[in-house]
Structures are given as structure tokens and as C-alpha cells.
Image (spheres, rainbow, N blue to C red):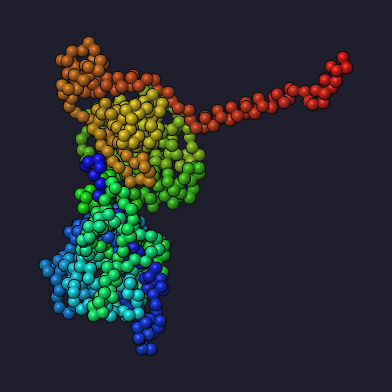
Amino acid sequence: MKVNEPVIEHVYTPTFYFEQLPNNNRLPSPQNSAATVDSDSAHQPRKARWYRAAVAPVAFDESTFWQVLERWILEAPSIIPPISKVEILQTASITAAGQGTTTPSEDNSYPTISDRELALLDGLAPFKSVRRQLIPKRSDKDPVMQEHLFYCRDTRQGQNQDQDQNQEKDADTSTLADPRVPNQAIFAPVIARTTSTTNSKDVEADSEQEGNKDTMKILTEMLPFYYPKVRGFRYGYRFDPEDAPEDKDDDHFQDDGEKEKNDDEDKQGQGDGEKQSAPTPVPAPKKKHTPKNRLISQRTGWLSLDLYLKGDEGEFTDKIQYAFKELFKKLYKWGNNTTKGFTKSRVQHDVMVPKDLYLRTYARMKEAHAQKWVKSWPERTDPTKFVFEDIAIAAWLVALWELERKSTTAINVDAARSEPNEATGRKQTFVDLGCGNGLLTHILNEEGHRGVGIDIVSRRVWDIYGPNTELKAETLIPNETVYEGVDWIIGNHADELAPWVPIIASRSKPLTRFVVIPCCFFDLNGSRYQFAEGAPDGKYKAYQDYISRVIETCGYELQTEVLRIPSTKNIALVGMSRKRKYGTDETKQLLEEGSGEGVSEDQAEEETERERIRRRVDDLVNKSGMFVARISDKEKQASQKVKQTAKLAKEVTPSLTQPSPSENKNTKDAQYVK
């Protein structure tokens, strides 16, 4: 891109109509409507229909809209946080089949569309149907629910516009959804049930049983808290490109509170004999100054959000409006980014442990430990963070170790004992360095893993865990520390011990595995790590690279996992196996580094793999300097108290040794008399 070339972009400028929806009691009642109605019809309840909730100009086309919707229905967890996963139950291409029902063209077992869903279709022609199930994260509290999704194209364009104009005279026509939007994706709640099959409920069945009188009540009671309490909603796309060249400099900004008019309303009144169709509420562009280096791209169409309402859904609170606004904005951004060919770089979870296994393990351990420790947490730290974080880390380790036991069948020759595996029933042992509050150690012990937690100072909560949890308060000299016969070494936010974890593991026997979750930035000598080369990608990433280099020196194959924990420091660096082959390049490097001084290349080739690793690690440790353990927080507090006491004593002592004012006066008088 040239320096003076303008940047082409599109601005998100939605218009929302929540205040005009019937459930907010802002629409005129049948009695006050300008339309003439008889006394009987005036008391009839308002008929359910589609209302426009939001609209925004977009710069993407119809194919992009459907491409985004395909991702949208599969990636519900990234759209709705309480959802853990989506299960697609059935997908079918559907065709009309007699008496207003729709059946799949290839799968006769697929359920027909109910009367309620036909009402949601509102005469649209669906070309695809998807049945999906939303699985919540809190399966013990939130119900599992199903949705019926319809991909529709409106075949009524240009037909029966007079009929569309006269529908629902008791409603405000500025919010009626435009029936001419040709591309629409309809979301209809079908089943909401708990994990217990005895409490299963079906919206259609209950609606028929109640004579369709309490449909909204049934939906409100059955739908999960995160799902909108409406009969249905839909996203639409209408192709409507701009033709005027001057619109290229229009950034579509609008003042807050300004009532926007649509293109159809602008055309009304131009001819007395012109027929008026149902209006489409779209924002009228307002001209503002556009910087010379920015060029706003032309719109290619309109994105819309419609809600199927009757007026008995209850008021749209700020929370509900916020949720719909966020969803609408996200759909716009996905479409805009897809047009640019931009795909958001997402972290890769569940690399080492499958998601299903982790979630099952976490749910079980959360049920067993969370409530107990959140209520009885004696530390000053926030239990809502640290308790759930340690449970999540423990769940991941337990799941990882379960997979390791299933895959381990060999005998460790060095230790002359079997590795942890399902056949022997032996679970992994561990040492938790820098265990802090010790909750991670306690949970792993409760799960049957024998291990000890070590920290520089004890915590109050240690006394509550009981005798089955082994915790030690001691200062380690990491260069002299090894753990024989231990399967895993854990460094969970281990501060100055973090870079030492792979070194201690490499020096221990037999093959000791490890996991490091870096947090604070410490060097091997115990001082703060200095980012000599800078940190263009952030200090946390630069420190990960430093720990990774240490792991590489120790000869481990590095594996990385982004943990699902409530912390921004959520990267786990894991060493489960060592590199088995070192070729000529490693030998040359060994000689060039100086640790192989006086050793020929042939002799170096004869060294064992373990000896090579030892020499490289020793060289790294020697270059880093002597390790100096930090002072514990308790020692710091004690030292500060001593200093404060000495300072107060120093301030008080002069006042005791100085003479009083009367003594000073007598002394001066005596000197004067003399």
C-alpha cells in the first residue's frame, strides 16, 4: 500500500428498535390504533408475528452471509460462553410436502415441521434444516436444549405487497419485519430438558396439551437462562448495493437518538398513484467529514435481526438488549472479516487432552471440591479465582495422567519397576515445587496420586487439609536437588523455581516428566529475568521462549497446552519424552561451546546421551551464576516490622534525652545571671 493511498474500511453503524417492540408496551393498543376495528376484535389478543429488532449496513455479499452462518451454528461455545459444545443431530435438504408440512428430500425419518415452526417460517421457503443440541458447561444446573434451524429464501418478492401492507394494523409498521428480505436463518427452540430423562419436556407437546394458551410460559420455564425468551429469532441479509459515487465518502455515522428513515419511506409521496409496500427500517446516512486518508467502502447490503413476538414475553431488559446487540455485532464482524479473508488467530486448546475427557473430569472434581473450599477458604486471596484455577489445573493433570497410564505398557529398565499403567493400577507420583496454598497438591492426593508439595513458607490453609496431604516448608537449593523415583515434577506458578523444573527433572531418575506453568519472570540465578533482546510479542511470550530454550537444552521434546483456567498466564510447557538421537550437528555445537574442550569429535560421539545432556545443562547453569533464594513474604514482613520499630525508637529517643522547656529556661536564666 502506498503512503498516500487511502485506507478502505467499513464502519459498524447499527440501528436498534428495542424500545418499539410490543413487549415494551410502546406500540399503540388496538383501541388506540388509527385502524377501524370492531368491539370484538379490539379485545382480541395481539397476534404473534415478526418484528424488526436491528438493522445495519454491511459490505459483504449473500454467499458470505451463508458462509458465516455455517460457522455460526457450529461454533456456539465461542458465541455463547455457557455452552460447552454443539451436537448436530441431523442436517437435511427439505422440500415442501403437502398440507403445509415440510419433510427432508432424502431422510424420511426426519421429523416434520410443527405448526409452531410453520408459523415462524411465515411463508418462507426453507431449503435446508438443521437440528442441533446445545450442551451446557454446567450440566448439573443448566438444561440441555435443542434448536431447529431453517435456512430460507423468500420466494414472495414482488408478490402480494398490498396484503403485506395491511397485516397487523394494531402494530407499529415501522418495526414490522420486511417480508422481502430474501436470505434468512431462523432459530426456533424445540426441546429444553434437564440431564434427567424423567424431566424431559417438549415445547410442541406441552403447547398442544395446554391448547397453545401458555406457549410463552412454557418457553420461559424450560429455556436455559442464556437463551432469549422468545418464540424464535432470525438473521437476514438483503442485497442492496449503493450506486451513488458520493456515498463512497459517507461513513454512515448517526447521532444518538436520531430516528432513522428507510429508503422506502423516502420514496413515499413521490406519486399519488404509487403503491406503498411494507417499509424496511434502515438508517439514513448522515454526511460527516471523512479524513483524506480513509475511504469508507460502499455497502452491498443490509444485515437484519427479527424477533417473533406476541407481546407477552415480558419487557426487554438492558441485559437482554445487551446480549442481542453483542450477538448482532459479532455476526457483522464475522461477515466483514470473512470478506477481507481475515481469520482470527485463536488459541489451540485441547492438544494433549481431549476436550470431552477434560470437561468430564473437571465437572466431577468441581462438584467434589469447589463449594467446600470456596466457603471455608482461610487465606486472604480470592477463593473464586484460586480455588477454581487449581481445580482446573488438577483436572487437566488427572486427565493427562489417565491417558498416560493407558498408553504405557513398557518396563522402565533403569528403575527395574513398571511405569504407571492401568494393568498395575499404579498412579503417577509427583512433587509440586512452589506449591503455595497447597490446594493443587491436596486435590491430587485426594485423587489417589501420591505426592508432596514444597514451598518456602507454610500457609494457614495447610493445617486444614489433614494428614493425607503432605506439604513441606523449606528453601531449596535447585542446583543440588534431584528426586529419584518420582514420575512428575510440577511447577505451577513456581516463581524463581520455574526455569529449574526441567533441569531438576533431567537430573532425576528414571525418566522424570514435568509441567511448567510460567507466571513471574525469574532467571536461573533467582533474579528477575532481563529481556535483553526486547519483547516485541510481549514479555509473557518472551519468557515462554526462554523456558522453552531451557527445556531444549535438557533434551526434552516440548509439548504445549493452553489451559482452560481463569488466568491470563495459562500456558503449560510439558516434557514427557526425551529426544533420542543427537547427530553430528549436536556434537559440533558441543565442541564449539567449549564444554567439550580437549575432546575429539570421535570421543564426543561415544558419549552417552545422558552425559551430553548433563554437560549442556551444567554449562547453562554455570553461565547463569549462583542461585540466590528470595526472601519469603513472612521474612519480608518481619524485617519491615523490625525496621519500623527501630525507626520509631529513633524518633522517640531524642525527645527523652532533650531537656524540657522549663529546664531550658532555667539554664538560660542562670547563664544570664552569671
Instruction: Tell me the quadrant of the picture where the C terminus can be found.
Output: top right
The vertical placement of 144 against 365, above or below, is below
- Farthest-out residue, top: 598
Image location (x, y in percent) of residue 7: 26, 47
Q: Residue at x 65, y 25 (%)?
A: 650
Quarter of the figure with residue 126: bottom left
Q: Depth check: give the residue in front, 59 or 123.
A: 59
Side (left or right) of 656 relative to 311: right
Image location (x, y in percent) of residue 325: 34, 60
Q: Residue at x 33, y 36 (%)?
A: 538
Image location (x, y in percent) of residue 412: 23, 31
Q: Residue at x 80, y 23 (%)?
A: 664
Quarter of the figure with residue 173: bottom left
The vertical placement of 37 against 537, above or below, is below
Using the rendered image of the protein, determine whether residue 626 is visible from the camera's viewpoint.
yes
Q: Depth check: give the residue in front, 199 or 59.
A: 59
- Farthest-out residue, left: 106
> How many tags in the picture?
0
Q: Depth check: give the residue in front, 296 or 455.
A: 296
Side (left or right) of 267 relative to 21: left
Instruction: Tell me the quadrant of the picture where the N terminus can be found.
Output: top left
Image location (x, y in percent) of residue 300: 22, 59
Q: Residue at x 20, y 68 (%)?
A: 182
